C-alpha cells in the first residue's frame, strides 16, 4: 500500500524541475497555445514525463491520466490510476507568479486515496491520504467552521454585484490551490460552474475532504474519477455547514449551465 512517504519525494523532485524553468526566478521557458486561451510550456511537458516515469515505477499496475498526455481510455478499466496536472496554474507560472503547483492523485475504484500538491514557489507541500488527514508542510489541516453564506470567504478576483454578500480573498491561478485554501481554513468556499477535467481537482478534492470540507461537482453530484470521459463540471467545495445552503442558492444555475454546455462542440 502506497503512503504519503512514497509520494512526497517524487513531488518535491517534480517541483524542483518546474522551478528550474520558472520565469519567477529569471528563467526563460518556451510556451505555446494548444487551444484558444490554453497555454502549455516546456516545463509542463518535462514535469509530465518525469512523473509518468517515476509514478509508473511506483505503481506499475496503475493507469495514467494527465493534462499533458494523450489519453488512453483503456486506463478506465484499471482499478487504480494516477491523475496528474504537471503544472496547475500555468498562467501564473508563465507570468512569474507563485499561484501554481504540481498536482498528483492516486485514484482507486473511482476515489482519490493519495494526493499531493507541490507549490515550490510558495515553499509548500500539501499531502493527504484517505482516512489519515491532510497536511501542509507537516501541519495538520482543518477547514473553518463558517456556517453562514453572508461573509463567507471566496478566492476570486471580482465578485458579481449579486454575490457581494460574500467576502473576496486572494485567488491563485491554480484551482487546486484554491481548494487547498478551504482545507487550510483560509477560504470557506470555492464554486466554479464550467467544464474542466479530472486532473484539475482529483488531488485537491482529497485534501479538502481530509480536512473536513465537502467537495462535489458544482451541481452537487458526487465526483467519480478515472471515467472514460474525464470531464467534470466545476466544483462546490465548502465547509460542512455551507454546502447545503450554497447548493440551494447556486445548484439550479449550475445544472442549467451544465446541461446547456454538455457537448464538447459547444
Image (spheres, rainbow, N blue to C red):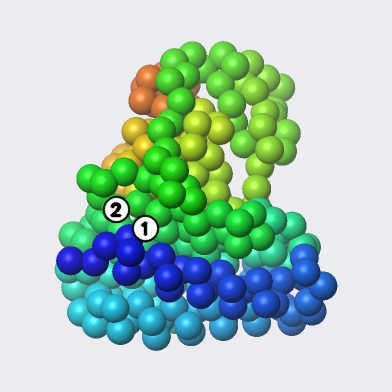
Residue 161 located left or right of residue 124: right
Residue 82 visible to the viewer: yes
Left or right of 35? Residue 217 is left
- In the rendered structure, are the residues bearing label 2 and label 1 in contact, judged by CB atoms less than 8 Å apart? yes
Q: Position of residue 85 (x, y in %)?
A: 49, 66
- Tag 2 secondary structure: strand
User: What residue is pinned by disc 1?
Assistant: 115
Residue with the mark numbered 2: 129
Image quadrant where one finds the N terminus: bottom left
Residue 4 image position (x, y, % from top left): 32, 60
Q: Is residue 200 visible?
A: no
- Which residue of the protein is positioned furthest toward the right in this rendering? 26
Q: Residues within 10 Å of mark 1 (few under 14, many from 20)?
A: many
Task: Report, in whole angstroms, how far the alpha carbon at label 2 lies from the one at label 1.
Answer: 6 Å
Q: Secondary structure at mark 1?
A: strand
Rendered position, 126 above or below 181: below
Horizontal and vertical percent position of residue 65: 38, 72
Q: Is residue 133 left or right of residue 253?
A: left
Nearer to the camera, 6 or 89: 6
Give whichever of 127, 147 is nearer the camera. 127
Amino acid at each position: 500500500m502506497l503512503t504519503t512517504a512514497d509520494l512526497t519525494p517524487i513531488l518535491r523532485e517534480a517541483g524542483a524541475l518546474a522551478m528550474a524553468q520558472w520565469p519567477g526566478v529569471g528563467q526563460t521557458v518556451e510556451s505555446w497555445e494548444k487551444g484558444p486561451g490554453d497555454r502549455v510550456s516546456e516545463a509542463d511537458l518535462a514535469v509530465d514525463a518525469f512523473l509518468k516515469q517515476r509514478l509508473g515505477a511506483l505503481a506499475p499496475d496503475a493507469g495514467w491520466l494527465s493534462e499533458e498526455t494523450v489519453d488512453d481510455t483503456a486506463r478506465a478499466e484499471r482499478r487504480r490510476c494516477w491523475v496528474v496536472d504537471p503544472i496547475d496554474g500555468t498562467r501564473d507560472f508563465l507570468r512569474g507568479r507563485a499561484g501554481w503547483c504540481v498536482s498528483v492523485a492516486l485514484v482507486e475504484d473511482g476515489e482519490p486515496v493519495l494526493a499531493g500538491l507541490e507549490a515550490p514557489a510558495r515553499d509548500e507541500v500539501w499531502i493527504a491520504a484517505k482516512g489519515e488527514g491532510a497536511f501542509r508542510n507537516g501541519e495538520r489541516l482543518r477547514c473553518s467552521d463558517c456556517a453562514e453564506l453572508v461573509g463567507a470567504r471566496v478566492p476570486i478576483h471580482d465578485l458579481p454585484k449579486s454575490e457581494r454578500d460574500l467576502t473576496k480573498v486572494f485567488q491563485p491561478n491554480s484551482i487546486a490551490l484554491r481548494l487547498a485554501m478551504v482545507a487550510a481554513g483560509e477560504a470557506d468556499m470555492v464554486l466554479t460552474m464550467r467544464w474542466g477535467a479530472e486532473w484539475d481537482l482529483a488531488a485537491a478534492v482529497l485534501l479538502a475532504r481530509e480536512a473536513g470540507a465537502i467537495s462535489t461537482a458544482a451541481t452537487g453530484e458526487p465526483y467519480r474519477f478515472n471515467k472514460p470521459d474525464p470531464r467534470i463540471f466545476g466544483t462546490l467545495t465548502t465547509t460542512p455547514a455551507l454546502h447545503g445552503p450554497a447548493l440551494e442558492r447556486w445548484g439550479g444555475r449550475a445544472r442549467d449551465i451544465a446541461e446547456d454546455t454538455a457537448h464538447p462542440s459547444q
